[in-house]
Image (cartoon, helix red, strand yellow):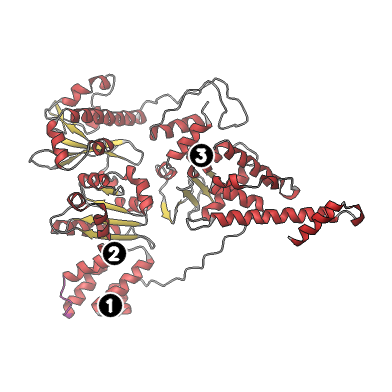
Amino acid sequence: MISQSFIQELLDRVDIADVIERNVPLRKAGANYTACCPFHSEKTPSFTVSPSKQFYHCFGCGAHGSAISFLMEYAGMNFVEAVTDLASRVGMRIPAQKSGIHPENPGSESGSRQESAPAQQPGTEAFTRDLSDAMSAATRFYREQLKHSQNAIGYLKTRGLTGETAARFAIGYAPAGWQNLDAALAGFLAGKRADLLAEAGLVIAEDGKRYDRFRDRIMFPILDLKGRIVGFGGRILDQGEPKYLNSPETPLFQKGHLLYNLYSARRAIRQAGKVIVVEGYMDVVALSQHGVDYAVATLGTATTPHHVQKLLRHTDNVVFCFDGDNAGRKAAWRALEDSLAQVVDGKNISFLFLPEGEDPDSYVRRHGKEAFERLFEHALPLSVFLFKELSARVDLRTSEGCAKLAQDAKPLLAKVAAPGLALLLLKRLAEISGFTRNELEELLKIRRFSSTRTPEKASRPQPASPYRWLIQVLLYDPGYAAKLDRDLLTEDTEYSEEIVALTELVEFIDNCPHISVNAVVPAAITYFQDSPHCKLLQKAQSETLAWDANIDVEAEFAGAMAQLRNRKRKQRMTKLHSKSLSMLTHEEKQELQRLALS
């Protein structure tokens, strides 16, 4: 029904972390994400998601799978429903096929029957879909209007935007006038609720009248982490207030939970190892046009704890970038206050202040990407910014000033949940104020933070057999299948299941010559889910979660092959020794001698 090649391409384009995070809050843990398992009750997280290999595994209950598996197990979808859901998120269309191999049962012909997606259900779910469709229809209307507005095009050109960038961000234009949307979307609205556009925040209905919320504004669509358009930011073209107008709170749109461009920037954030948070939509767009693709913006509001929490799930390094004026300092301080309770040890939050009169948009246009990124060297770590600001408010030359510094710091330190950071902040406060740490703990009634020794990282255990070792290597990098000496994959009664599983995995990779490194694991999960070797392969996959980016895969492969050759050598010697010397042929005697010396 659905070709294996389509499944592979789909899983290569889907981000499993985003799929799972729709329902399960994830926390960054090195290269992976962790959470309490959604499939069994637990207090300590044992559920791990690998964004690089695109699979999840629970070390508690053994739940294991790809993005498709998750939707089937967690959301109760069947296979076709799960594939359809994922395909719609990444803009892929499932090709119609009359026959083929059913991915849930690789060994069976599916025939010409095509299972259809579930019918739309009435009620809240259907209304939510209508709201989402209304936002998409409005986006198309705004984008079409931009093509015909020389004034709007001229404005974007003065801001240095290219047509390509405007198209990539789906930027549009809401024309002047009061009832454009009702007329333009009349066909779409037929048969739908009369208040749909009002509920979506696109029109305002009051005193029996309706009029467009956005008029004569550049329109920036705002996406949630599902990739749906859920709201808009509108920038006025000429003078007027407000300069920026955002969608109101709706069933789809909550400003305090959303960040502009986060959905599109996810991969760039992971590749860069950081995210930069700016204040305006145009800052994000301009930075992206100049190659800084890992920028996001709050939606005209102050940073919230939800924003910080969401950002820290995507990266270990968050850089807040603000103008260097008083307003920028105040915004940065609010971001710091909201970050204290969210930051954990191992995460870094810093604050970058641009030169007077500059914003990210103007700076990157004037100086370029490299100069902008060099500014990160001057970003202030959270701890430095915290005490720099507090110290500036008091006179540390006096005892009264030192006492006030300690009191001002008290409510802020009380928010810090990360024990290591809290301890270091307390020590730093002691250095600045002149109090001892013990005195501060007593004065501020702050609990003592005992230092804990981090246990040494245990060495990775060697797999029980060279066959299992090779399975791990191929699941980590399928390219090594081409280097495998397949003459060594002969019968071995002690590890017969692992040999068969390895052989079938190699055949799977051979039949998918264009499969990417990132797609092999989720594709194999789907292909082998009904195989008798499914559990063995899942276990091998879970073991690769401990492999980080520094692992020497070539050495792993060489080690596994050397162990396999040594095992085959010993097996052959045992077989030859089982014969009496007089029964050995001349060639066998020479072979035994070579094996003994090798």
Most frequent secondary structure within the magenta stretch: loop
Q: Amino acid at mark 3?
A: Ile
SS state under label 3: loop
Q: Residue 381: which disc?
A: 2
Q: Give the mark, 3 or 1, whose residue is nearer the N terminus.
A: 1
Determine which quarter of the picture holds residue 177. Answer: top left
Q: Which mark is residue 99?
A: none
For residue 92, say whether it is visible: yes
What are the residue bounds of the magenta stretch? 393-398
Closer-to-camera residue (585/158): 585
- Marks 1 and 2, how far apart in space? 17 Å
- Location of residue 180 in the rendering, given as x and y in whole percent from the top left corner: 16, 25
Q: Label 3 belongs to which residue? A: 515
Within 10 Å of disc 2 (Cα), the crowding (few <14, some 14-19, many 20+) is some
Between marks 1 and 2 in the image, the one whose residue lies nearer the viewer: 2
Q: Earlier in the sequence, mark 2 or mark 3?
A: 2
* Numbered tag placed on residue 431 in the rendering: 1
The kind of residue tagged 1 is Glu
Q: In the image, residue 219 lies at what x, y percent? A: 20, 36
